[in-house]
Amino acid sequence: MEPFEIHILGCGSALPTTRHNASAQIIKIGNKQFMVDCGEGTQVQLRRNHIHFSFINHIFISHLHGDHCFGLIGLISTFALLGRTAPLHIYADPNLEEVMKPQIDFFCKGMNYPLFFHSIDATKQQIIFEDNTITVETIPLKHRMPCCGFLFREKPKQRHLIGDMVNFYNIPTYMRQAIKDGADYTTPDGETIPNSRLTKDADRSRSYAYCSDTAPCDNSMQLKDVDLLYHEATFADSEKERAAQTFHSTARQAAQIASSAGVKRLVIGHYSSRYETPDTLQKEAREIFPATIAANEGEIIRID
């Protein structure tokens, strides 16, 4: 099975600290890499985590608070300095292009690669990226400005051919793709061999949801049964009034959302700078949802 990995580059919140970097993640699915959010210092984190810049072709920005997008202009500039020629696609609120254009014009003169901004409507659940193996769709969130999460989902996969059966029936190469897709095989003598005798079950399709920043909101149907949910847990339960005022979530609320949606595992992050460690947040979340991981920079979380 191809790798499906979440690389945590930053899991802090608005105020910078020496303990955490601003929000940023790399999602690796097979040989593809996607970036979600790009807070200040993200390109340094890419270097520290030995992630190749040239493999990043799609960047998804949840909203236009600085701790989620201040690293973009530096990364765009570095791509140009490295001689990038491949297109770069950025998916974000439509205001981002307007904000970035003067900076790009000033700091990135002579940039030799195409840059495309794709506007997204944070209020709607919709597919914003699709190729032959995955889809990425928006998850409407509840914050002080337009904000959405992202759901990465593998498409249904092909069944596996049973080599001995393929050889036994001498199935021509040109017919094997159709059999992987579920077709039966008819021999030259007219005998129909059912697909179930020629193939094994396909690998299961996996999914990952990223939700930051948000107050608790009713998106349990969209998150239902995802393999891994990253949900902000800015505050402990003792600060739930502050969380409500700022449209953030507590660790306990993140766990309740994970439990309601029936997700398999929960990763919490976006910690307030007031916490020296995420231990209290993780403890509160695990009281409701035991399969909770507290994110840390440099961590790689795999979905099998």
Image (spheres, rainbow, N blue to C red):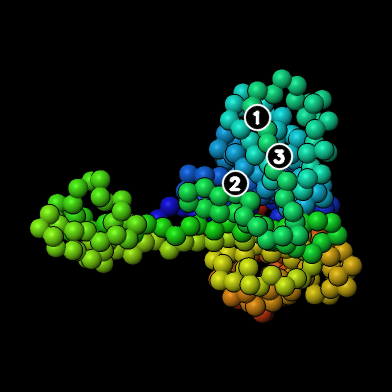
Where is residue 159 drawn, in percent x and y?
34, 59
Where is residue 28 drawn, in percent x and y?
54, 49
Residue with the mark numbered 1:
114
The image quarter containing residue 200 is: bottom left
Residue with the mark numbered 3:
117
Q: What residue type is disc 2 on?
A: Phe
Up the image or down, 277 lies above or below 29; here it is below
Residue under the point 61% across and 27% down: 84
Q: Secondary structure at mark 2?
A: strand
Q: What residue type is disc 1 on?
A: Pro
In this rendering, position of residue 81 left or right of residue 250: left
Residue with the mark numbered 2:
34
Q: Secondary structure at mark 3?
A: strand
Please tell me which residue lies in front, 265 or 206. 206
Alpha carbon distance from label 1 to label 3: 10 Å
Please tell me which residue lies in front, 196 or 77. 196
Q: What residue type is disc 3 on?
A: Phe
In this rendering, position of residue 168 left or right of residue 117: left
Q: Secondary structure at mark 1?
A: loop
The image quarter containing residue 252 is: bottom right
Query: Number of labelled discs?
Result: 3
